[in-house]
């Protein structure tokens, strides 16, 4: 599939086989296949049931605090001297990130399916916290798999999950980070098929997860359309979001994919730099392969063995990316950029000082790209950054890198 | 077309006994030891060999096989080296079937057509690829069948009557019944349920049914072989081998011999248990 192969719409995917072009699919063990088919059926039924939407809307309003504000970042705009920069404030959601949008949808679905035991993987801990939170709200057992390395570097979130009543299982296999946590969650699911719902944290995994997570996160972009209409009377000119698995990004992008005048940028984590092996930019530095139930861009060696991603941000160091992003890269609708650890750290500090908003290290990568993009655009250009999470969880990591401040 | 797998199950059926199917990971703990073990398997009583292709992210495997894969990868095992092991084995053994077992990504990266050509040329008879369910048959299953390789599918306790025909379509060689939901090597199967499940599968297919996951001892192997056409042993065998390794994970003088001795015990268990006739088996099921 090349850049000239333009579909009529970018918003119709996936096909019934769960494919976005060559990407996506259902590459799972037979034990899980019947569960995935059940989930697909249950999700399809929920989508056309007004009571499902009504329950979700009520919780969004009263529990999550939606809609999240669209905030004009005046001082960052002045600093850049170009585009007018807005932040979509997902950091103000309950639990401090966009993750809860997806978790709420999946847990409501799990309840409809009669599942009583929820499992999740987590990297930075934000998805684990969101899952533990909603499980507490509904009295469901919650087991979170987290790489032992991440348990160490995200201690505040581990404590939060435990306070919320979740069991946190440190994963000692492989490189002890997010991909290994996902392997371990899949092993749990394959073992506990009757009562367990796997709440995947990003828009990846076997079909229907990439589409389902995208749909639950699309409230971000849907709100931005309305809010920008109110603020400026028109659509934004560009969108920028960071990409780990890519759920916050696809949630912002998807409602705009068929508006060709809207430029869209995803920002991967370049770690120590794309010229080194220590990065997590699977689209810039990887190739298509199959892992965790889907075909997508992956970091791997010449023999097809998966290699570890590196990023200062635990939420971005996954060696893959959601399959819809792989498709949007190949068809050229979205432009994927990258930012290094150092650029993200600089952006983290700048945003904190200019806007009084401490961003998570994940969206700090997107802010880093905005510092390059905004000055090259005219003053009437409307640029929206997805501020996907708040940085409280990262202050110790940042302090370590800055020599204790 | 009759493959080595078809021929082997047919001749064992004539003897009225089940096949002993053994799994080892290629290149574990190093390619020389692993090759020596591979060549020693038939004489120890193995009827069908499953040779694991190591992968960094074996989502359906328990800790024992995960560790085996990591040892092999650390020692530099690659898909090309695994195929070379099969080619070497075929210099001296042209009868024992070899099934390559693993995950799709290394095959996909090698290139499906190139992989099938190379596997066929090396003397591989069949494939088990854990993360390719029937929904993804276009990827590898159909090209493999066209190339004359068996494509062996896993059926599990979650494969209900409605789904079983889907799983059996395009399956050849034998059906691998996974006797427990879960990862390799952990839970112990309930042999009554196993017998019922095998009988249920056999109502839908004439293919031999081999049973695996959780078979640890000669007694387990004997119990399973009364109800199935084959009994698969993997984790218990690898755990036995792993126990002979030194503190750095390297092979010792005992590695191959201790492992083959363990297999000889399994083989005695399988050979001692005569298979109940299919009709008798059906009658026993409530």
Image: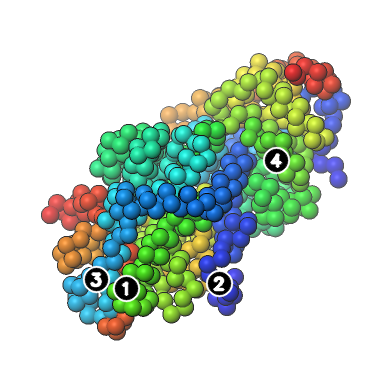
Sequence-first tag of 1 and 3: 3
Name the chain under label 2: A
Q: Could you say whether the residue bearing mark 2 is in a helix, strand or loop?
A: loop
The x and y percentages for residue A286 are 48, 61
Q: Which residue is mark 2?
A: A9
Residue at mark 4: B163
x 35%, y 39%: residue: A137
Marks 1 and 3 sit apart, C-alpha to C-alpha, by 13 Å
Q: Secondary structure at mark 1?
A: helix
Q: Nearer the viewer, residue B143 or A303?
A: B143
CA–CA distance in space, label 1 to label 2? 26 Å
Looking at the rendered image, the quarter that the N terminus of chain B falls into is: top right
Specify the label residue A230 is tagged with: 1
Q: Earlier in the sequence, mark 1 or mark 2?
A: 2
Quarter location, residue B117: bottom right
Considering the numbered disc 3 on the image, is that residue within a helix, a strand or a loop? strand
Q: Residue B113's spot in the image, x, y percent? A: 70, 58
Query: Is residue A342 visible from the viewing direction of this image?
Result: no
Compared with residue A194, is residue A133 higher up or lower down, i.e. above or below? below
Q: Residue at point 19% right, 77% down?
A: A78
Q: Chain of mark 4?
A: B
Number of numbered markers: 4
Q: Is residue A237 above or below residue B25?
A: below
Q: Which residue is mark 3?
A: A72
Mark 3 neighbour class, 10 Å CA radius: few under 14, some 14 to 19, many 20 or more = some
Which is closer to the viewer, label 1 or label 2? 1
| Chain letter of the residue beneath label 3 in the structure image | A
Tag shown at residue B196: none
Indicate the position of residue A346 as horizontal and vertical percent values: 22, 64
- Same chain check for tags 3 and 4: no
Q: Is residue A346 left or right of residue A45?
A: left
């Amino acid at each position: 599939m090349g850049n000239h192969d333009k579909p009529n719409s970018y918003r119709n995917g996936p096909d019934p086989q769960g494919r976005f072009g060559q990407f996506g699919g259902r590459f799972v063990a037979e034990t899980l296949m019947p569960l995935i088919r059940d989930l697909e059926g249950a999700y399809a039924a929920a989508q056309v049931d007004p009571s499902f939407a009504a329950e979700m809307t009520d919780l969004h309003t009263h529990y999550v605090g939606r809609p999240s504000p669209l905030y004009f970042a005046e001082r960052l705009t002045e600093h850049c001297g170009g585009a007018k920069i807005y932040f979509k404030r997902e950091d103000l959601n309950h639990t401090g990130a966009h993750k809860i949008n997806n978790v709420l949808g999946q847990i409501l679905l799990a309840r409809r399916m009669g599942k009583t035991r929820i499992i999740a993987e987590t990297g930075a801990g934000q998805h684990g916290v969101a899952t533990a939170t909603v499980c507490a709200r509904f009295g469901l057992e919650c087991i979170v798999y987290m790489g032992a390395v991440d348990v160490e570097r995200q201690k505040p979130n581990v404590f939060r999950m435990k306070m919320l009543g979740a069991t946190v299982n440190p994963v000692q296999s492989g490189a002890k980070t997010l991909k290994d946590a996902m392997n371990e969650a899949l092993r749990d699911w394959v073992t506990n098929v009757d009562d367990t719902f796997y709440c995947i944290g990003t828009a990846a995994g076997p079909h229907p997860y990439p589409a389902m997570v995208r749909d639950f996160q699309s409230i971000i972009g849907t709100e931005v359309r309305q809010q920008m209409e109110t603020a400026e009377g028109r659509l934004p000119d560009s969108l920028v979001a960071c990409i780990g698995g890519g759920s916050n990004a696809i949630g912002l992008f998807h409602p705009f994919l068929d508006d060709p005048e809207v430029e869209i940028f995803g920002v991967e984590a370049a770690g120590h730099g794309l010229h080194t092996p220590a990065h997590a930019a699977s689209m810039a530095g990887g190739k298509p392969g199959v892992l965790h139930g889907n075909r997508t861009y992956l970091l791997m060696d010449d023999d097809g063995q998966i290699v570890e991603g590196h990023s200062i941000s635990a939420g971005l160091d996954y060696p893959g990316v959601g399959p819809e992003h792989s498709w949007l890269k190949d068809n050229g609708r979205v432009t994927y950029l990258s930012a290094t650890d150092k650029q993200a750290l600089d952006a983290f500090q700048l945003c904190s000082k200019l806007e009084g908003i401490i961003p998570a290290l994940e969206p700090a990568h997107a802010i880093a790209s905005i510092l390059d993009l905004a000055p090259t655009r005219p003053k009437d250009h409307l640029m929206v950054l997805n501020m996907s999470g708040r940085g409280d969880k990262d202050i110790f990591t940042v302090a370590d890198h800055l020599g204790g401040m | 077309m009759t493959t080595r797998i078809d021929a082997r199950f047919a001749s064992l059926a004539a003897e009225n006994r089940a096949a002993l199917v053994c799994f080892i990971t290629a290149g574990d703990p190093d390619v020389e030891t692993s090759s020596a073990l591979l060549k020693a398997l038939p004489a120890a009583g193995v009827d069908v060999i499953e040779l694991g292709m190591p992968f960094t992210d074996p989502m359906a495997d328990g800790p024992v096989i995960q560790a085996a894969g990591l040892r092999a990868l650390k020692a530099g095992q690659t898909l090309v080296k695994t195929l070379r092991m099969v080619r070497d084995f075929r210099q001296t053994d042209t009868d024992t079937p070899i099934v390559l077992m693993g995950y799709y990504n290394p095959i996909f990266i090698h290139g499906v057509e190139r992989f099938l050509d190379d596997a066929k040329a090396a003397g591989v008879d069949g494939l088990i690829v854990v993360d390719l369910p029937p929904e993804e048959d276009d990827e590898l299953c159909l090209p493999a069948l066209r190339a004359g390789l068996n494509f062996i599918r896993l059926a599990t306790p979650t494969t209900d009557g409605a789904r079983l025909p889907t799983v059996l379509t395009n399956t050849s060689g034998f059906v691998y019944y996974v006797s427990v939901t879960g990862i390799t090597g952990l839970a112990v199967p309930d042999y009554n349920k196993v017998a019922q499940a095998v009988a249920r599968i056999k109502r839908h297919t004439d293919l031999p049914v081999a049973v695996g996951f959780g078979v640890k001892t000669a007694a387990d192997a004997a119990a399973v072989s009364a109800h199935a056409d084959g009994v698969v042993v993997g984790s218990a065998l690898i755990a036995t081998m792993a126990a002979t390794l030194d503190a750095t994970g390297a092979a010792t003088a005992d590695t191959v011999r201790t492992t083959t001795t363990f297999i000889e015990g399994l083989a005695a268990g399988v050979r001692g248990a005569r298979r109940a006739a299919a009709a008798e088996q059906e009658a026993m099921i409530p």
